[in-house]
Amino acid sequence: MLEDKIVTENEVRNFYRLSYIIFSLIVVLVFAIIILRLYKIQIKMGEYYYDRSEKNFIQEIRLSPLRGRILDIKGRVLAQNRPSFNLFITPAFVKNYRKTLEMLDRLIGIPEERFNDIILEIKKKRGLERFKPIKVLSDLNFDQVAIIESNIEELSGVEILMDSFRDYPLGNVASHILGYVGEIDKKTLLEKNKGTELYKQGDIIGKRGIELSYEDFLRGEEGKEYILVDAKGFRVDQAEVKDFLKEKARKIPPKQGADVILTIDLDYQRELEKIFDVLDGGLIAINPLSGKIYALISRPSYSPSKLSQRISKVEWNTLVNDPLKPLVNKVTQDHYPPGSTFKIVPALAALNKKVVTEHTTSFCNGVFQFGTRPFRCWAKKGHGSLSIHRAIVQSCDVYFYRLGEKLDIDNIYDYAKMLGFGSKLGLEIDEEIPGVIPNKEYYKKNRKFGSYHKGYAINSSIGQGDVAITLIQLAYAYAALANGGKLLKPIIVEEIRDRENKRLLKNEINVITHLPIDKNVINTVVKGLYGVTSEQGGTAFYQRYKVFGNDKRIKIAGKTGTAQVIEMRDGKNVSDAYMHKDHAWFVAWADVENPEILVAALHKHGGHGASGAAPYVFKAIKIFYEMYKGMEFQEKVSTTNISYIEAGD
Amino acid sequence: METLTRKKSNTNIGILLLLCLILIIVGIVNLFSVATPRGIESQYHSQQVIWVIIGILICSFFVVVDYKKLETLSYPLYLVCIILLVAVLLFGKTAMGAKRWLDFGIFQIQPAEITKIAIILSISKYFSDKKEVYESWPIYKLHVPMILVLLPFILIIKQPDLGTALILLLIGGFIIIFNRIKISHFIFMLLAGVGFSLLAWYKFLKPYQKKRIIAFLNPESDVLGSAYHSIQSIIAVGSGQMFGKGYMKSTQSQFSFLPEQHTDFVFSIFAEEWGFVGSLVIIIICISILFLILKISSLSNDIFAKNVSFGAFAYFFLHFSINIGMLLGLLPVVGVTFPFLSYGGSSLVSSMILISIVINVGVRTGKHE
């Protein structure tokens, strides 16, 4: 060591003094920053981070409520829930999507069109979403479940979870009453929620029928469960860590949906489904005194079970584009000119307004000349001289042309509206359509060239032209005649009960209007309608005979109707003979003195009302008396003796 | 004068020992909570106790042997460390994508940790030998200490262990600055450092290291990705609020939301369970330890002693501040432990050795002049 490099203590001390001061200041500065930061995180934002830490490990699980059942009047199940096994994939835990899906395809088969959809759906998920299981296949059968379970080791990220599945045990029976369910769409989600979180994407909601209109009762209330998860999203054994859940209620059980009990009788519905074997049309059977519906059929039917599942686009498009429109309820959502069934309207109007009396007669020679235009009766040779009674019985067009001319269209309009035509009756399944009842104003609006003239009134009086009604309107208008003048609101839900059997709703007879029509007038018309089935020359006399023979115990009043299919003639399928055929209507009730059952049927392209629709109605009435009144009828009616030419209306 | 200094020095040593003991005990108690997720008994805390005992045995050597003798061992120890670091790269045990440990059968060591001590000793030795204390150091005369730092720095970067390498660099830098280099040269060093960092960014940093730094700059950008550690740590600390969730009540550790919660992130869990109050107590202990070491360093008149204890100060200051800064989201996530609290033998024993060296200096202050 060199002499000059030896330093004194003081020199050393002075040399380093500045360093100590600087580093002391650095320590103070750095730790001041740290303490300030700590203060900000723990005190100022402490609550926020506390919340964040809770959300880290407490996961809110929604417990879906079990949907209420739909039962018939005798408590038999029309719609229920059954357990189903669904296959879920959690993207975060899948190593190779394609391999996993290929393996699944080998094991249980994946529909080809779903394959790429699934991959896309999985790949779309980002961040925390990747830890949520996605439903890939629903409703696996037991064999499929067993195959998956035995290979689960190789299928990481795949699991089978149980869920409840909407089940319609009767197949297609009553499909248009029940409707079906499905996943909620985005528009409905917004409408239903209105800012709340009532529904979430992927929830099941009623799409049609009772399922749709009684959704709020059927759905029940969602429950909640708070579970603990670790960083990987794995469920933590709750018992081990119950201290962490103190402040949250552990579980709020879901509230099951209420049972909707229909006025429908399954036995009757089923029998009518058997006999009403038409391709396209509708049938409704009601109690004319209470307005309660016993049976309702629309053809073609669909399978509610199938529609409630995830159906492919192709299947859905086939349904929607089917020319027979299976999704449309032909009882409430389809309207046609009522034909002669509409004749009760001018009849009631004319009698009540004393335009004619019971005894006024008129002569039919087969044609009614209005100005230069001839209006023809369906009976080309004419009916001769007849009163209003025989005019109804024989459905004479000329008689009603004259009434139409005398009444003019606005009177017909008023009485039609009175009877419920042209307005929604308020059946709580699906959206009813109102139909069309034209008046002068209507023609002013809808006919650009040429204003209103009486020809329209003449056409309206026999239910042709622009007049269009639904089958349910027909049924309830005739029910008003049957029950002496009360237009009733259709009732299909008897009551609603929750799972504790507490009654939440009970439907009672609901009179829309008491018809301001003289009782005698109604009686006159009813007599005529009775004549339709009971008098020689009645348009449904032969058809009644074919079902009941000479058995006159049950007095049936009814009316045939034939809607001319005009629009089809300039349609595309002109060559198709079927599409040319007229629509057949028939409506009837029994017994005239003690009304218990009213049945209305529309057989599209069924031809004449008498041959195309009346047989189903008579059979339905016969079954009603057999089933509920214990009456027995002759099995087979011999028609060889009868020499009556079938009526053409 | 001398007796007064001695007395002062002895009180300082006493308090320093006590504070370190408190930290060690808090560390073990905290490890018991941290490493026991949901009742699964783990061995971390009991192993830490064994390391404390081993540490005490090793430390007794560093206290008893005069630091003058330690000074002569500086360069040989440095050489041993370099050999060990090369050995790690050749035969090291790979864990989490990095070779950091040497496996000796019954125990594993992290040579990088011991290198920190070797660096402090050897640079101190260098300045002590020079004895050129009258003037500020010009930078061109600092090539020896710079090489002393950069050689192990490069070897550790290769492992890769960015945190330790940076700490090493900073410790070296601290000691060099402590010996008063010229301001203009200091600025030149800073610029060189920035240049080096840029070079490192494009040449040497592993993608995961880059990701962590990017994530630090914008933590909410990728919650489940690189910023995950940072965010989960802040949530842990923040959710502790004023008084904490209580001992063993950390949800962040119980549900494994915070990875490496027993090593680098151990203080987050402490802050979650003991809140602002508890954290502040620990921070005050840390600050006290730092000032006590500085005091002991300043009381000594021996240049090696001053430098070596200042090196210990640099070590603790950098570990405390970088670790806490990282947990609070002030700094990017780099692997830096919290002395005495974090689990791990190498870190604990290194910290204990450095404290022993400081005590060694303190005890012998005034004896060699």
Image: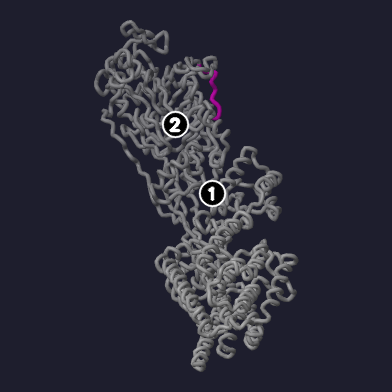
Q: Nearer the viewer, mark 1 or mark 2?
A: 1
Q: Residue A556 is drawn in which quadrant?
A: top left
Q: Which residue is mark 1?
A: A81
Specify the farthest residue to the left: A354
- Residue behind mark 2: A331
Out of B276 and A423, give the one closest to the viewer: B276
> Considering the image in quadrants, where does the C terminus of chain B appear?
bottom right
**Which residue lies at the image location 38% right of the left edge and 27% below the top edge?**
A435
Chain of the residue on which disc 2 is drawn: A
Q: Left of A160 or right of it: where is B221?
A: left
Total number of numbered discs in the rendering? 2
The residue lying toward the viewer, choosing from A9 and A334, is A9
Q: Earlier in the sequence, mark 1 or mark 2?
A: 1
Residue at horizontal 29%, vertical 25%? A415
Please report the bounds of the magenta region as a residue range. A634-642
Point out residue A315 in the picture as x, y percentages from the top left corner. 57, 34
Dot 2 falls on a residue whose secondary structure is loop
Q: In this rendering, does residue B344 appear at all?
A: no
Rendered image: mark on residue B208: none
- SS majority, magenta: loop
Name the amino acid type tagged 2: Val
Q: Amino acid at mark 1?
A: Asn
Determine contact: label 1, label 2, CB under 8 Å: no
Q: CA distance from mark 1 to mark 2?
A: 28 Å
Chain under numbered label 1: A
